[in-house]
Image (spheres, rainbow, N blue to C red):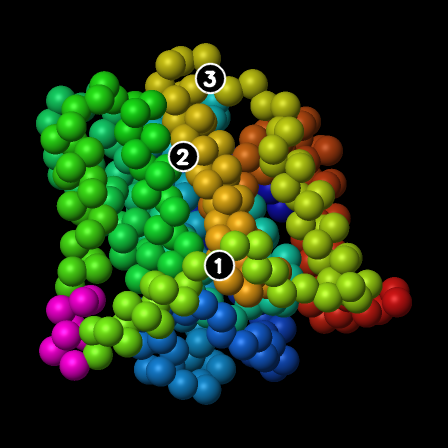
C-alpha cells in the first residue's frame, strides 16, 4: 500500500480520504463516548454547535484529518525535510491519530494540531528571508489560536521562540512580533467575553484551571497498559529512526525544530490537568514526521510489511477491542 504514496503527485493526496475512511469507519456505527477534558473556549463553542450528531462529528473529523495530512505533506515537500519527495508523512499522521479508539472523537487536541502544523510551516518559511515579519507574526498567531482550542498548545510559544533562534539571528523586534501575534487571539476572545459580561469566568475556567503539575488520569487495567505500550513502541520507533537526513544546514535546522516540537509536546504532559491517554494526540504531528523517517530508512519490502502489520493491527483492535486477549 505504501508504494501508492511514494510519489510527488499531489493528486495522490486524495487517496488519503480513502485511507482515513477505512481507519475511521467503525466510529459511525460504534461511536466512542470519551468525555471532553480541558477543552478551550473555541472547542466548547464547536462542541455546542455540533451537539450529539455523531454523523456530523465523524464527517468533520475525517475532513479535518485529511486537511492536516495534506498540510503535513505540503510542509515536508516545501521545506525538503526528506531526501525524497513522498506523501508518507500524511499517511503516518492518519495512522497514528487512529491507533486508539480514544482518539476518534473530534477533540480539542485534534483541532489544535491543525494550527500547530500551519505554525510550523510559517516558522520554517522565515528561514533566510530578510523580510519575514508576516511569517513571524503568523507563527505566533497560529499558536495562540491553537491555545484557544486546547490550553497546552500555549507551551509551543517556547518552541517558536527557540525555533526562531535556530533559524535566524536574534532581533528583538522579531521576538516582539512573535509575542504580539500570539496575544492577538486572546485579545479578541477576551473582548468577546467582556461583551458577554463573563471575562472573569473566562480567565478562571480556561486559564487558571487549565494548568496543574503531574496530574494524570490513568488506571492499572491491562487494557490501559496495552494501549500505553503500543504508543511507547511507536514513539521509540520515531525517536530512534536511523534515517540519514540531508546534510544541508537548512535541513538540519528544520529537523532540529521537529525534535524540539516533540520535546515541547512531551513537556505538556507535566502541566496539563487530568491527563488521559487521549493527550498523546499532541505529539502526533512531530512523531509522524519521525516515523516517516524510520520507514524511509527501511527497504521497500520491509517497510510495506511493517506498515501492513500496523494497519491491520489498528483495524483489528478497533473492531474487536483491546480486551480480546485478556
Where does residue 182 sit, x and y in percent of width and height? Answer: 23, 48
Q: Secondary structure at mark 1?
A: loop
The image's mark for residue 76 is 2
How far apart marks 3 and 1 lie (CA) works out to 40 Å
- Residue under the point 54% across and 77% down: 35
Marks 3 and 2, the one that precedes in the sequence: 2
- Identify residue for label 1: 212
Q: Secondary structure at mark 2?
A: helix
Label 3 neighbourhood size at 10 Å, few (<14), some (14-19), many (20+)?
Answer: some
Q: Main secondary structure of the magenta part?
A: helix
Does residue 234 appear to the left or right of 171 in the view shown? right
Does residue 187 appear to the left or right of 13 in the view shown? left
Q: Residue furthest right?
A: 326
Does residue 194 appear to the left or right of 79 in the view shown? left
Label 2 neighbourhood size at 10 Å, few (<14), some (14-19), many (20+)?
Answer: many
Start and end of the magenta stretch? 189-197
Amino acid at each position: 500500500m505504501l508504494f501508492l504514496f511514494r510519489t510527488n503527485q499531489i493528486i495522490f493526496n486524495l487517496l488519503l480520504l480513502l485511507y482515513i475512511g477505512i481507519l475511521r469507519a467503525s466510529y459511525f456505527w460504534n461511536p466512542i463516548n470519551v468525555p471532553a477534558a480541558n477543552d478551550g473556549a473555541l472547542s466548547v463553542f464547536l462542541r455546542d454547535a455540533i451537539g450529539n450528531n455523531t454523523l456530523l462529528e465523524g464527517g468533520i473529523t475525517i475532513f479535518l484529518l485529511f486537511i492536516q495530512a495534506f498540510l503535513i505533506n505540503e510542509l515536508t515537500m516545501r521545506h525538503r525535510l526528506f531526501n525524497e519527495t513522498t506523501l508518507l508523512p500524511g499517511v503516518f499522521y492518519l495512522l497514528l491519530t487512529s491507533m486508539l479508539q480514544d482518539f476518534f472523537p473530534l477533540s480539542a487536541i485534534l483541532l489544535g494540531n491543525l494550527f500547530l502544523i500551519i505554525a510550523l510551516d510559517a516558522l520554517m518559511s522565515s528561514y533566510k528571508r530578510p523580510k519575514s515579519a508576516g511569517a513571524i507574526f503568523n507563527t505566533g498567531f497560529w499558536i495562540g489560536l491553537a491555545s484557544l482550542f486546547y490550553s497546552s498548545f500555549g507551551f509551543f510559544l517556547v518552541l517558536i521562540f527557540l525555533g526562531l533562534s535556530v533559524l535566524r539571528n536574534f532581533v528583538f523586534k522579531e521576538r516582539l512580533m512573535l509575542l504580539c501575534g500570539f496575544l492577538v487571539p486572546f485579545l479578541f476572545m477576551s473582548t468577546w467575553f467582556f461583551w458577554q459580561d463573563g471575562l472573569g469566568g473566562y480567565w478562571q475556567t480556561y486559564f487558571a484551571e487549565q494548568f496543574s503539575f503531574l496530574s494524570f488520569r490513568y488506571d492499572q487495567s491491562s487494557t490501559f497498559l496495552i494501549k500505553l505500550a503500543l504508543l511507547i513502541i511507536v514513539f521509540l520507533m520515531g525517536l530512534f529512526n536511523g534515517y540519514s537526513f540531508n546534510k544541508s544546514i537548512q535541513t538540519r535546522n528544520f529537523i532540529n525544530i521537529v525534535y524540539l516540537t516533540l520535546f515541547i509536546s512531551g513537556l505538556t504532559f507535566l502541566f496539563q490537568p487530568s491527563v488521559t491517554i487521549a493527550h498523546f494526540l499532541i505529539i502526533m504531528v512531530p512523531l509522524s514526521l519521525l516515523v516517516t523517517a524510520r520507514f524511509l530508512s527501511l527497504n521497500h519490502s520491509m517497510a510495506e510489511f511493517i506498515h501492513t502489520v500496523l494497519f491491520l493491527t489498528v483495524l483489528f483492535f478497533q473492531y474487536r477491542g483491546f480486551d480480546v486477549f485478556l
